[in-house]
């Protein structure tokens, strides 16, 4: 038997049933993504290795004002050429279809992978055509959110 919480409880209990039932795992999925902005860090070339790294990886590592700017942990001196400028992306619209929703498209149940600016619903890659559709041509069967169970 594998070492899991359910198997431990099964072996330690007094009243063991003759046949062990399948264990169910429940996960909570938030119903609403309230984050309206995303930060994309700048990308630099690390002067030590020549590889592309984020600005955070080559930061000053200054955690408080008592730490001097020229501390030995300061990695900003290894900033090479800036490849991508950092930016903040602010989402202004909230769409009714989200990744993980189950929708009906052309008579088939499909799992939504992503929605692109409200113009296109992309489905999970499962070898079935079509790979995407207009939001007007799909009908929501089940919205993601709440408790979801999965046998393991």
Image (spheres, rainbow, N blue to C red):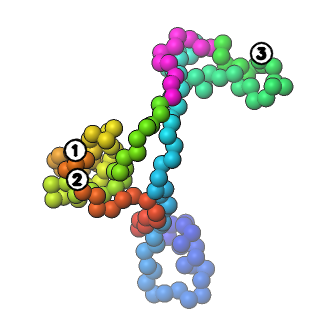
**The residue positioned farthest toward the right in the image shown:** 66
The prevailing secondary structure element of the residues shown in magenta is strand
Residue 140: image x %, image y %? 28, 58
Find residue 44 and name its label.
none
Residue 81 magenta-highlighted: yes
For marks 2 and 1, give the CA distance: 7 Å
Front-most of residues 16 and 83: 83
Residue 74 figure quarter = top right
Q: Sequence order check: which comes first, mark 2 or mark 3? A: 3
Q: Is residue 144 visible?
A: yes
For marks 2 and 3, give the CA distance: 57 Å
SS class, disc 1: loop
Q: Residues within 10 Å of mark 2 (few under 14, many from 20)?
A: some
Find residue 138 and name its label.
2
In the figure, is residue 73 to the left or right of 108? right
Residue 147: image x %, image y %? 46, 65
Whether tag 2 and tag 1 are in contact, CB under 8 A, the answer is yes
Residue 141: image x %, image y %? 28, 62
Q: Badge 3 is on which residue? A: 70
Q: Which residues are magenta?
A: 78-88
Please state which of the two labelled residues, at mark 2 or mark 3, is closer to the viewer.
2
Residue 55 magenta-highlighted: no
For marks 1 and 3, give the CA distance: 54 Å
- Residue plotted at (25% across, 47% down): 135
Front-most of residues 59 and 6: 59
Q: How many marks?
A: 3
Q: Badge 1 is on which residue? A: 134
**The residue positioned farthest toward the front in the image shown:** 92
In the figure, is residue 106 to the left or right of 55? left
């Amino acid at each position: 038997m594998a070492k899991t919480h359910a198997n431990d409880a099964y072996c330690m209990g007094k009243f063991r049933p003759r046949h062990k039932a399948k264990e169910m795992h429940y996960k909570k999925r938030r119903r609403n993504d309230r984050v309206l902005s995303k930060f994309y860090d700048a990308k630099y070339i690390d002067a030590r290795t020549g590889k592309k790294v984020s600005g955070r990886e080559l930061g000053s590592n200054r955690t408080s004002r008592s730490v001097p700017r020229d501390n030995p942990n300061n990695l900003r001196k290894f900033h090479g050429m800036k490849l991508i400028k950092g930016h903040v992306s602010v989402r202004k619209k909230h769409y009714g279809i989200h990744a993980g929703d189950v929708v009906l498209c052309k008579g088939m149940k499909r799992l939504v992978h992503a929605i692109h600016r409200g113009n296109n619903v992309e489905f999970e890659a499962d070898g079935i055509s079509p790979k995407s559709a207009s939001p007007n041509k799909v009908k929501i069967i089940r919205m993601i959110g709440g408790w979801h169970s999965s046998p393991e």
